[in-house]
Amino acid sequence: RRGWEAEAAAVVEDVKRNPDSAAGGIVLRRRLQLMMYNNMYRIMFDRRFESEDDPLFVKLKALNGERSRLAQSFEYNYGDFIPILRPLLKGYLRVCKEVKDRRLQLFKDCFVDERKKLASTKPMDNDGLKCAIDHILDTEQKGEISEDNVLYIVENINVAAIETT
């Protein structure tokens, strides 16, 4: 709860510091979007983005936006239902695969591997507060899931969180 309250307080402070908010008005949606990403990524990875201009936030938001745009362009893979359309969808499916691969690589490099490095230098015991990725990585370490499973779990949680914000 403290994390949520801290993020909401940060939004208020950012708006107060912005001279445009008093004079001409600002678009609050962008800052609220950052707040929601920070809440979600704090729960998942014990990580937050410093501002709307944070390079990782910008990259992640762009990849999530591209994924949403592609997902909304076809609700179903019509090639599965109408085989004659398959050749026409090859380019679309190739772009979908490229976006998926870039997103998974970003999650692996910037979140999963980073958290693994942190866990190898700092003991993660049950006395301390764990974030979601710590539990997922514990499960991987026990051999119950593979690294691919870890990435797909992270990706699916990200999609669910982004689509509900």
Image (cartoon, rainbow, N blue to C red):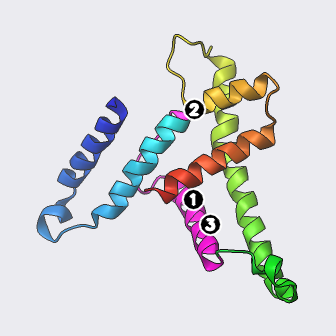
Residue bounds of the magenta highlight: 45-74
Q: Identify which residue is drawn at 60% across, 69% down.
A: 66
| Residue 139, x across and y down, in percent | 72, 26
Which amino acid does the dot numbered 2 rest on? Ala
Majority secondary structure in the magenta region: helix
Residue 59 circle label: 1
Name which of mark 3 and mark 1 comes first in the sequence: 1
Local crowd size for mark 3, using a 10 Å CA cut-off: few (<14), some (14–19), many (≥20): some
Residue 82 visible at all:
yes
Q: Which residue is mark 3?
A: 67
Quadrant assignment for the C terminus: bottom left
Q: Quadrant of residue 93?
A: bottom right
**Residue where numbered disc 2 is placed:** 132
Q: Is residue 48 magenta?
A: yes
The local secondary structure at tag 3 comes to: helix
Residue type marked 3 = Arg
